[in-house]
Image (cartoon, helix red, strand yellow):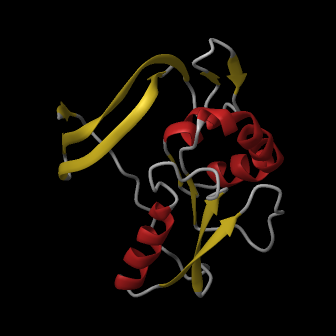
Amino acid sequence: RRSYSARIRCAAREPTSDWPDVITILSVFPELLDLNGDAQNALVLAQRARWAGWDARVHNLALGDSLEGEAPQAVIVGSGAESSAPRVLEGLRALEGSLRAWSADGIPLLAVGTGWELLSESVELSSGDALEGLGIFSGHSVARARVSDDLVVDSDFGRLIGFENHAREYRAV
């Protein structure tokens, strides 16, 4: 088990009267970006919203589907296999305008693993080849030995306990 002490900040955005009656949480390509159950974060957020008194739904956007309707109130982008990263990146490029606009409008993007890396500037694959990401997040990832273990982080919000499983190191710019 690895233990970290980190300062984690959260910018809460209170729902306003112009929010829709139902909060929509968009899960991007869950059929490809659910390597460690990451797409299920959307279900957790929807349930937490319900417990807080809001109606909430999860919209699963499959690779190749088009976006319909209004902007979601949150976006989830999970982690996937390295072998599918080029296809996922191609799909994300089709959503790039919406993802950038939503981010600029303050809509939270919860991205982990491969999803985070593809939304950043670049991803170095285990082969040494690199994929140019969307650049929505600054930084890039580089290949390294796989780390797979429990993770404990002491934060301003208390102790956070989770699991890490990755074969790249992220370097912020």
Residue 50 appears left or right of 93: left
Residue at horizontal 35 percent and vertical 83 percent from the top: 51
Q: Position of residue 5 (x, y in %)?
A: 18, 33
From the viewer's perspective, is residue 25 above or below residue 51?
Answer: above
Q: Residue at x 59, y 78 (%)?
A: 19
The quadrant in which the N terminus is found is top left
> Could you tell me residue 86's position as x and y percent?
74, 34
Q: In the picture provided, is 111 more to the left or to the right than 150?
A: right
Residue nearer the viewer, 165 or 75: 165
Residue 143 falls left or right of residue 64 = left
Q: Which is nearer the eye, 30 or 138?
A: 30
Task: Report the residue at 53% width, 55% height from top.
Answer: 108
Name the foreground residue: 85 vs 93. Answer: 85
Please give the name of the residue rendered at 65% of the width and 48% of the height, measured from the top-left corner: 104
User: Is residue 7 visible to us here?
Assistant: yes
Q: Position of residue 85 (x, y in %)?
A: 67, 36
